[in-house]
Image (cartoon, grey):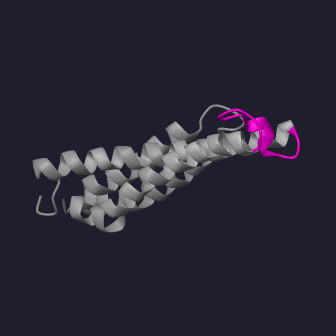
Amino acid sequence: MNDIILRVLARLMIPFALVFALYVQFHGDYGPGGGFQAGVIMAAAVIFYALIYGLSEAMRVVPEAVVETMVALGVLLFAGVGVAGIVLGGNYLDYFVLGADPVSGQLRGIFWVEAGVGITVSAVMLEIFYLFAGRSGRIDDDE
C-alpha cells in the first residue's frame, strides 16, 4: 500500500499506541488494565504497521524468531514467579514471600506476573497474525 496519508498517520499513531500499552501495563497494579490488555495493544500496533507497510516489513521490524522467543520468555517469567514463591517457602504464585514484607512482595509478584502475561499475549497474537497473514499472501508490499 503506497498511500502517503496512511503511512504518515501510522508513523504518528504507532508510537502513541506503544506508549499507551506501556501505561496500561504499568498501571495494571493500581487500576484497570494489566498484562493482557497491554499485550493486545502492543500486538495491535505491530499488526497495524503490517497492514500499512506490508507483512515482510513488519517481520523485519519484529522478526518471527523474536516473537517465538517472547512466547517462551513470557511463560517462563510467569512460571518463574510461581516457582520463586515455592522456593521462598510459600505456595505457587504466593506473592507475599517475594519481598521483605507482604505488601512489597505482593507488588513485586503482581508486577512480574503481569509482565509475563503482557509479553506472552503480545507474542501469541503476533505469531497467530504472522501465520495467517503469511498463508493468505494478501498482506504484501505489492498491494
Task: Report the magenta stretch's main SS.
Answer: loop
- In this view, the residue in front, 114 or 8, is 114
In this picture, is 30 found above or below 143? above
**Which image quadrant: the N terminus?**
bottom left
Residue occupying the far bottom of the picture: 60
Residue 47: image location, x then y, percent: 33, 50
Range of residues picked out in magenta: 88-101
Going by the image, does 80 lie left or right of 2?
right
Q: Can residue 102 be seen in this view?
A: yes
- In this view, the residue in front, 87 or 2, is 87
Going by the image, does 21 lie left or right of 67?
right
In this picture, is 25 found above or below 64? above
Residue occupying the far right of the picture: 101
In this picture, is 139 found above or below 141? above
Residue 142: image location, x then y, percent: 11, 63
Question: Residue 90 lies in what quarter of the image?
Answer: top right
* Residue ID at (37%, 56%): 67
* Residue ID at (60%, 47%): 80
Q: Total marks drawn?
A: 0
- In this view, the residue in front, 25 or 109, is 109
**Which image quadrant: the C terminus?**
bottom left
Residue 69: image location, x then y, percent: 41, 58
Q: Can residue 20 be seen in this view?
A: no
**Residue 137 counted in the magenta span:** no
